[in-house]
Image (spheres, rainbow, N blue to C red):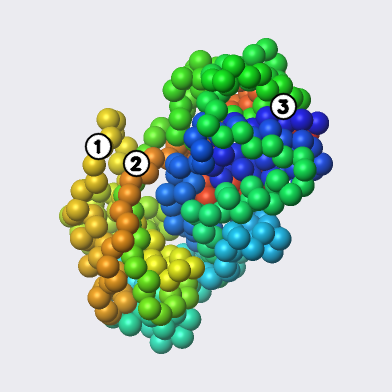
């Protein structure tokens, strides 16, 4: 079988990986020299902790297994089974963490409520004041800026994978074929369009309006911290954002503890991961209304610096990079991904939202199973 994959972000790359793993030939087409979208502009978190129970959690847990398996074969992914800590302050935040630990699926996530001393034994860099911390053992991390490159190198070594950069697919031709802006026709037994937040042009032509929206975010990265940050770190604003924490305790938190005005205005949470070079990737904001701004604003960055410094109990290293990104999210946020047959033999797979880095291996596996690869 020959599979044509369009889009070299993490979702497209994982579809290529699944096809090659199953013995098939892959032609992988990317409109830029390298993927430059949300697959690079994220935390690199394999984030199990906040996922909704049921299909979303099952997908994240399966993806976590696949990431670890692939990471063992492709060291360049930088896979680390580091877990995460969410420090909490005050009775209302603590009650949300306690409700999370009481979930039936808490053991599958590796939830445990830690005292400050226990949390610092896991992550000594957290020297700030807090009352407890929610530990999620199943969370992990990879390096988002290099993961696709490492996967591609491994794919190329099989001899069954061809990467074609700087080619924008302009047309779906009949069944199982696409034509690029060089005029070249690429035909196979299946075509998978993994176009991320690119929902216009070809996608609109072949799929029509899709129930997917675009979401903009702002993030930043620091100079090396100078010490290990041994886990991912979130703040209690993540309770307001992730469905796993929905409970009466969360309702009480929302009613009784106002979110910081800057965080509320920009729909913010703190997520933080240390990169292999020692720097910290920190974010993020969420913007849903179009048209998106073309610039970044400083208030969210100032807020994140204050929150991080309060948890670390020390000044943050200098900010070296700031960026904005856009990802595609299903309008019905309970859906893990939008998977649509747009022609016989041609599928569109998009809209995982902030789950893309976490869930892409399992999303691709499901596609491969459904298409009978």
> Is 310 placed left or right of 66 in the picture?
left
* In the rendered image, the vertical position of residue 8 relative to residue 67, given as above or below: above
Picture disc at residue 190: 3
Q: Secondary structure at mark 2?
A: strand
> Is 254 placed left or right of 215 in the picture?
left
Q: Earlier in the sequence, mark 2 or mark 1?
A: 2
Which one is in front, 238 or 161?
Answer: 161
Q: Are marks 2 and 1 in contact (CB under 8 Å)?
A: yes
Residue at numbered disc 2: 216
Marks 2 and 1, how far apart at CA: 9 Å
Q: How many residues crowd around disc 3 within 10 Å: few (fewer than 14), some, or many (20 or more)?
A: many
Marks 3 and 2, how far apart at CA: 31 Å
Q: How many residues crowd around disc 2 within 10 Å: few (fewer than 14), some, or many (20 or more)?
A: some
Q: Quadrant of residue 133?
A: bottom left
Q: Quadrant of residue 235?
A: bottom left
Query: Residue at 66% across / 50% down in the picture?
Result: 153
Which one is in front, 97 or 228?
Answer: 228
Q: Are marks 3 and 2 in contact (CB under 8 Å)?
A: no
Query: Residue at 24% across / 46% down in the picture?
Result: 296
């Amino acid at each position: 079988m020959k599979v044509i994959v369009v889009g070299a972000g993490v979702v497209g790359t994982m579809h290529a990986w699944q096809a090659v793993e199953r013995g098939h030939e892959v032609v992988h087409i990317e409109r830029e020299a390298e993927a430059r979208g949300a697959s690079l502009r994220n935390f690199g978190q394999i984030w199990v902790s906040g996922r909704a129970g049921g299909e979303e959690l099952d997908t994240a847990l399966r993806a976590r297994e696949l990431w670890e398996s692939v990471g063992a074969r492709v060291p360049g992914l930088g896979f680390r089974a580091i877990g995460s800590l969410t420090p909490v302050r005050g009775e209302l935040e603590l009650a949300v963490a306690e409700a999370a630990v009481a979930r039936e699926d808490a053991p599958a996530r590796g939830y445990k409520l830690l005292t400050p001393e226990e949390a610092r034994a896991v992550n000594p860099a957290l020297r700030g004041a807090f009352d407890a911390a929610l530990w999620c053992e199943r969370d992990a991390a990879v390096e988002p800026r290099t993961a696709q490159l490492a996967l591609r190198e491994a794919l190329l070594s099989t001899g069954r994978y061809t990467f074609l950069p700087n080619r924008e697919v302009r047309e779906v031709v009949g069944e199982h074929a696409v034509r690029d802006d060089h005029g070249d026709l690429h035909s196979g037994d299946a075509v998978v369009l993994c176009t991320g937040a690119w929902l216009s042009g070809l996608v609109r032509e072949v799929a029509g309006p899709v129930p997917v929206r675009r979401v903009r975010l702002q993030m930043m990265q620091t100079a090396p911290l100078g010490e290990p940050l041994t886990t991912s770190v979130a703040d209690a604003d993540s309770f307001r954002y992730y469905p796993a924490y929905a409970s009466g305790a969360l309702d009480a938190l929302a009613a009784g503890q106002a979110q910081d005005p800057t965080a509320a205005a920009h729909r913010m949470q703190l997520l933080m991961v240390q990169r292999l070079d020692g720097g910290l990737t920190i974010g993020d904001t969420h913007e849903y209304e179009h048209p998106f701004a073309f610039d970044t604003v400083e208030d969210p960055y100032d807020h994140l610096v204050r929150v991080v410094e309060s948890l670390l109990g020390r000044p943050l290293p200098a900010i070296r990079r700031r960026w904005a990104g856009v990802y595609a999210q299903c309008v019905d946020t309970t859906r893990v991904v939008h998977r649509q047959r747009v022609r016989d033999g041609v599928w569109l797979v998009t809209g995982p939202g902030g789950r893309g880095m976490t869930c892409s291996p399992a999303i691709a596996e499901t596609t491969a199973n459904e298409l009978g690869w």
